[in-house]
Amino acid sequence: MTTQEIANRLVELCRIGNYEQAVKELYSPNIVSVEPEGVPNRVVTGLAAIAEKGKNFEAKIESFNSSVVTDPIVADNVFSLAMLMNVNMKGVPVPIDMNEICVYTVADDKIVKEEFFYTPPPAQQA
């Protein structure tokens, strides 16, 4: 698959909320995931760690009010997209906007690195 094809497939799966399928289908077994400075477990490596990270995130969410995944921008073996979500977090009385820029690196037909750029809420910081 080309980087463009991988980017398009990731967007397709994320738009329908099928993140688990995206990881299984598109991620390298040695995937590296990087969150912004100050976030606990900022860097994790491997599919098991990514799965655990996803479970931990979902456990904090009470409901998704809206979700937008932009079209990807591709350059060589790297692509980026924005994910814009409005969610209700457990224990938080008002909805929260969670907006981030996601940058992915592709090698050998798999995503080998994902990096997220956003301002963490004070409660998420270490």
Image (spheres, rainbow, N blue to C red):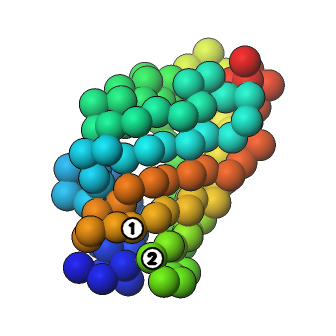
Residue under numbered circle 1: 106
Whether residue 97 appears in this view of the structure is: no
Quadrant in which the N terminus appears: bottom left
Q: Earlier in the sequence, mark 2 or mark 1?
A: 2
Label 1 residue SS: strand
Residue 78 in view in this figure: yes
121 or 34, nearer to the observer: 34
Q: Is residue 9 left or right of residue 97?
A: left
Task: Give the SS element for disc 2.
Answer: loop
Horizontal and vertical percent position of residue 108: 27, 68
The residue carrying mark 2 is: 77
What residue do we see at 46% from left, 64% from top? 105
Labelled pair 2, 1 in contact (Cβ < 8 Å): yes
Total marks placed? 2
Q: CA distance from mark 2 to mark 1?
A: 5 Å
Q: Nearer the viewer, residue 120 or 74?
A: 74
The vertical placement of 11 against 37, above or below, is below
Left or right side of 31 for 61:
right
State the residue at coordinates (45%, 54%). 113
Q: Residues within 10 Å of mark 1 (few under 14, many from 20)?
A: many
Vertical arrangement, residue 29 with respect to residue 60, above or below? below
Task: Tell me the number on the disc at residue 73.
Answer: none
Rendered location of residue 65, percent (x, y): 53, 47
Q: Residue at x 61, y 40 (%)?
A: 35
Whole-percent x and y of residue 99?
66, 53
Q: Which residue type carries mark 1?
A: Val
Q: Amino acid at mark 2?
A: Asn
**Above-or-below relation of 80 to 18:** below
Tag 2: Cα neighbours inside 10 Å, few (<14), some, or many (≥20)? some
Q: Position of residue 83 (x, y in %)?
A: 56, 59
Q: Residue at x 72, y 18 (%)?
A: 126
